[in-house]
Amino acid sequence: MALVATALLADALRDGPPAMPAYNLPPGIARNLGPYSARYSVEHFGNYPSITHELPGGCQVTQVNILHRHGARFPVTGQTKDIKAALDKIYEAVSKDPEVLRDTPLNFLSDWKLPDGSNALVDFGRKSGYTSGLLTAKTYQSLAVGGGIFIRATNIDRVMETSRWFRHGFNGGPYPTERRSLEMPDVVIPVGANNTLSCKIFQASEMVGDRDKDMTPVPQSVHVADRWLAIYAPPIVARLQSYIPGLTLTNNDVRYLMLLCGFETAYLGEENISQWCAVFKKEEWAKNEYWYDLDKYWRRGYGSPVAHASGSGWVNELVARLTGSPVRMSGCVNNTLDSNRATFPLPPTAPLIFADFSSDNNIASIMSALGILQDTIPLSPLGPPLADRLWVVSKLVPFATKLVVEKISCDATGHEQDLSEQEQVRPPWRHIDGHDLVFDDTEESILSKSASTKPFTSNTTLYIRIILNDAVVPVLFDGCGDLASSNGMCDLDAFLRAQGFSNNGGD
């Protein structure tokens, strides 16, 4: 079976590695759509410099853990309702004088229709899942052939379907193809309390209160991000209302109308652009992004007192995979599934690649539980947005986001020599999606490169490295070691110690 998959993958990549689908929009818009941006290759985070993807000599990836968001979708039911309500206000005002739109940026509305659909993936999202799987198999070709992949997903249709397209791409299958022919994930977990990919225990994370100017709590009825909305939206409201006499919009109406740019562009595909994108100004898109940064930060990230506990269950599962030990049963961990080696395999007999499929809210909570990309200053709802902030949602959890935790084994002699010479040795393949890689499509050659075939010795040192949307994440945990700043590699024991919050049951 592995040889067949290798041949299919080689055939799928014969014309070179594909690129992730991208919106045909300027970066000033495409990268300011918050969680509705399409995944793109991130260069670096905040003021931290870009970190090389090359491994030091004597080092190789031996295990891969992937946390993946579903691909681009239609608006969910609630969003569709809010968008239609805002549009109805415009249509009602225009009905009194249809000619009023003629010389305004809204003139396209005379023959425009809202795409019909809710909740489900669009074709752009399906292709994103497929391409991500294909690139993953190429990046980790030795592990893919040598140990296979184990895939879990929630039972939300768009999440489960993305995982199926990912596996299809990972196996080198053709695109497009019939959805019914796609393989299912290995485990499908129902949404609910005992699900680390859709944790519902800590519902209070939805109700985090606002922070006043001095960051003291104020009543929960006031949403943090809406403080920012009240600052940046009124000028947009005034401009849109000036186009159409009698039009009355709210600040939230502006946000719902701005949603149409990303959603419709995803629906139209890679070559076309929603006309809604041109309705708003460049600086308004940057302010739009910050609303989503605040929303995720205070409800699902470091600003929430409980969100990191919500993400701790998945971190405990990661620790179990990295160490080959039983899962610490706490938080949203599913005791039944995670104590069964058929539904939660562990080394040394487990596949070498794990891929879990989830949603943006859950992934944001997991990132905060991991302790990565934490700003030293809390994001202020009063602005202005800091250019060097780490928590930028379009980088962290866009459609099809991919967080990778690599386990790396280094021969002590090899990487000590590498450090002393300050020269990095290129491994036989690179570890970054979307870039040229050395690819020998003969099955024998690929199998000979399998990282799983190299035995550990007393001189072996283990590390982890985290990659988010092609960018190596700076690791700032105590005791990570000399390779942290140069290669983004943290000593495995130091990383495990840093996860004490999750290991202690989220307390």
Image (cartoon, helix red, strand yellow):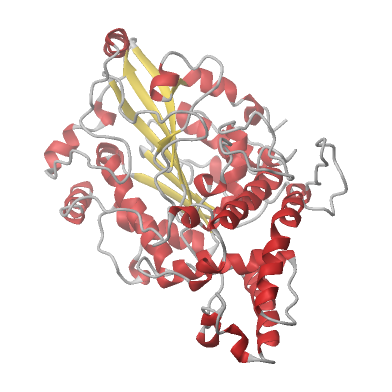
Q: Which quadrant of the figure contains the C terminus?
A: top right
Identify the residue at horizontal 67%, vertical 66% (top origin): 254
Q: In the displayed orientation, state which residue is furthest to the front.
A: 103
- x, y (%) of residue 444? 12, 39
Question: Residue 314: where, in percent of width, then height?
Answer: 57, 40
Above or below, comparing residue 427 to residue 145 in the picture: above
Look at the image and tell me whether residue 429 can be seen: yes
Query: Does residue 462 lie above or below 138 as drawn?
Result: above
The residue lying furthest to the right in this view is 219
Q: Nearer the viewer, residue 307 or 274?
A: 274
Q: Which of 287 and 69 is in front in this view?
A: 287
Residue 210 lies left or right of residue 379; in this view the side is right
Please state if 261 lies on the left or on the right of 451 as rendered. right
Q: Is residue 455 above or below residue 507?
A: above
Residue 42 locus on image (x, y percent): 43, 42
Query: Which residue occupies the foreground of this view, 124 or 501?
Result: 124
Q: Can residue 195 be seen in this view?
A: no
